[in-house]
Amino acid sequence: MKGVKGGATLEEIEAVYRTQLSGLRRLAAAVSGSREAALDLVQEAFVRAVRDRRSFRREAPIEAWLYRIVVNVARNHRRAERTHADVPIEIGPHDNGSRHDDAGRVAAAVASLPERQRLALFLRYYADLDYLSIAATLDVSSGTVGATLHAAREALLSLLAETEATR
Amino acid sequence: MSERITSVSAALELLVPPFAADGGNWAEIVEKAAPPPRRRRRRLILAVAIALTLLASAPAWSGSGYGPILHFLTGKPSKKVDKLLAQFGEDQPPGQAVHPIVAKTRKVYERHGRYGTFRIWLTPTKEGGVCETLEGPTQHAIQPYSAGCGAKTPQHPIEVSGSGSGGGGDFFRGELDGRVQPRIRGLELRYVNGGHEQIPLQNGFFATGIAAVRTQRVSDHPAELVGRDRDGHVVARFALGSFYEDFQPGMGRPPIAEAKRERPLLRAPLEGGTSVELLVSPARGGGTCGRLVVAGSTWTWTCVQRPVRHPVRIGLLRAPVRSGAAVVLYGSVQPGVKLQFRFEDGTARTIPTADDYFLVSLPKARWTPGRRLSEIVARADGRVVLRVPVARRGAAFYSTTPDRRPEFGHAMPRKPPAPASALHGKVQRGRAGGVSVEANAKGRVNFFVSRTSRAFRLLSGTSVGYGCLHVRHAGPPWDVDEMTVLLRFAPSGRVSVWAQRPFDGCEIQGGYGHHWRDRYGTHSAAEVPFDAVGRRFFAERATARDLANLVRSAAFRTLRRKGAAAPAARVVARFGSPIDALRSPGERPPPGRIGYWARGNRAVLSEIAPTGTRFFIVLVDGHVAQSNVAGLTQAL
């Protein structure tokens, strides 16, 4: 059997792309703050992944490597597009007033979380990654992931409750 | 009307609803990722061009005759380095122009140390020499510090290109860089207080930061570089006597704390009933000094000039406590700056300041991920002037391993020798006038001079004699056996006097000359008796010196040349109140005064020591005919 020492194959990358595209796009939208840009960002991230596939060192699951590229591309996009407003209010569906209000409230609460907490939440809920893969993506220990997610959930619910009470 | 959001998944569902499943466009990805053939050819051409450039540049180095074999490191100099080098060709007087070939600059040194990254770039010159450019850490990035041009090869075993107080934060205040000859394989930096550390060499070059605690006091300054060959033998030394001397007070010179005016300012409790305390004092030359004391021991001492240039200066200390380490943050702020700590759980805390200093111990509850310190925010006039992210510094920030306390010099952390002047087992100890001495059984003697002492003021920056003595009282005269070692003054001098103990006392003699009743007095700058005999010796010697200095003085020699002894009234009129006319040659003058008696060609001068001993000098025809000061003074 031919062993694969390093680098990712096209087939492996394609498999992740085809099976997890929705989660990848949601992640890109959440990190970049732009639902419209999410499609292009995922495409760009996978172009990079295919081009640099030999640099994958197989020290972590391939999903973690690919998600990290998506996060980096989305984050770079956010920085490039960033205005003074930190709150990504445009990522909601904008279909009716009340949903818009709630999405804005959630966006504001999420934006006030520390970045690591925010990314851990996105990776857990949108990408459905396990703790090990989240740890590899964020370059932290899996124990840290659990604690970070717990803190993020607590903080987010607390912030939402506060904004609910003040409305 | 919106509904209450009660779960995280519901909130996130609302934030980014699912996308419609369209299968994506994998083909586009593969197509875009494939490199176009034309581009590949261009890359090849570029690679050939780079190779040719490198080949063209090689002769400049290979033919430069640079003695040592250099292993160039990868990396290109920044534009700032190039700009600095390019300036060497400008405005140079004819015949002295140096023209660095900037395009051939190569990196010869790079190390990531405690205080940041240092790099040294080497550039050949059209004149056949080389230029060195040092880059080092600054507040925000690595920047060129300095550049200098000279000979291709080191002309001395150790060459120091630059030294002194540099930029940087609280933990880095000085730097030292240079190069060594190839035979030197190891380099050691020694400090005035006896501490030392290895300085890494790369291609024969070195560059290192000097910790702030090493720049605050003369006793902690770097003193010497020692070079060793491959066998570990010392083959070269380079004295760093002028370290920091180029910096004037208020111009960046490390200020010195006025320790006597120190006062406690802030205190933070630590576990186990201990505490960390910040004490402040004015600094000579302007500014203030803050001393951090943990459980009664000095930990660090940092001085800042006023006005403070940065909104906030933050120091981190992992103080030792029973369970490991406590994380303590301390520092200073600009006047009017308010400080706020923000935590990962979204809470915030305003940090109180006192006299623009702050001191906070982070409780263990704040070590837990999710509750840690995430950011320090400084505000002035309601506007954010600085954000310092902390969370990204990682778990090492909350290490349970306490910091090692820095080595200090003579005074602060070291317990002073016992005041009793007596033999204590194997070590003789004594203290007087802010000077402490320890002499061990092997003839090795440590001198510790408090910087607030008179001796320190008299001796700083001079060559001095460290000595210990055996004395035997035989009348007078005294029988004195003293071994003195001449060295440059260091407040924490360690000398080997190779004389047999026990000593009756030790002293440090200044290199200054003496005049009668000058500001130096007749005692040595530091005199530390170990026993009663030593105490008596120092007292009587001072009196003998006083008398001898008068007789040797130029003014008194004028009187002595006359042949006949000068009348007492004339001597008293010439030298004033310290001289008393005596009615007989054997009369004892009052304590502290000099008696003078004259008749014919004979004159007698006498003075009573605090011990009651009468010292005298008899002059006949202006020449010293008799005295009992011999052995106590070389003045006559």
Image: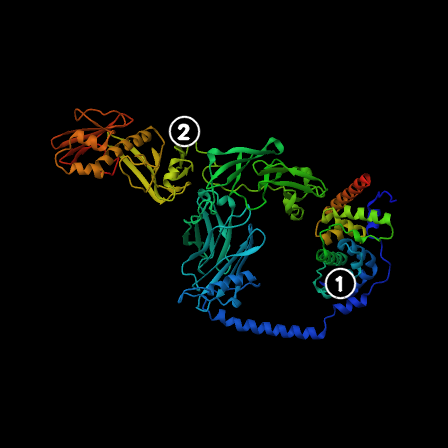
When asked about the image quadrant of residue B397, the answer is top right
Q: Nearer the viewer, residue B99 or B197?
A: B99
Badge 2: chain ID: B
Q: Residue at x 71, y 61 (%)?
A: A56
Label 2 environment density (alpha carbons within 10 Å; few <14, some 14–19, many ≥20): some
Q: Residue B503, how many percent across, how many down?
A: 34, 34
Query: Can residue B589 be seen?
Result: yes
Residue type for callout 1 = Glu
Where B165 sits versus B24, above or below?
above
Q: Residues within 10 Å of mark 1 (few under 14, many from 20)?
A: many
Distance of label 2 from label 1 (alpha carbons): 80 Å
Q: Are tags 2 and 1 found on a single chain?
A: no
**Measuring 55% from the left and 60% from the top, which residue is drawn there?**
B80
Look at discs 2 and 1 and give the one toward the viewer: 1
- Residue A3 in sight from this viewpoint: no
In the image, residue A22 lies at what x, y percent? 83, 57
**Can you name the residue that lies furthest to the front here?**
B381
Q: Position of residue B572 (x, y in %)?
A: 20, 30
Residue B420: mark in rendering: 2
Q: How many marks can you see?
A: 2
Is B376 on the left or on the right of B130, as rendered?
right
Chain that bears disc 1: A
| Residue under numbered circle 1 | A44
* Dot label at residue B414: none
The kind of residue on which mark 2 rests is Ala
Q: Secondary structure at mark 2?
A: loop
Q: Nearer the viewer, residue B155 or B134?
A: B134
**Where does the C terminus of chain B fall, quadrant-wise?**
top left
Q: Position of residue B463 (x, y in %)?
A: 35, 44
Q: Considering the image in quadrants, where does the N terminus of chain B appear? A: top right
Q: Secondary structure at mark 1?
A: helix
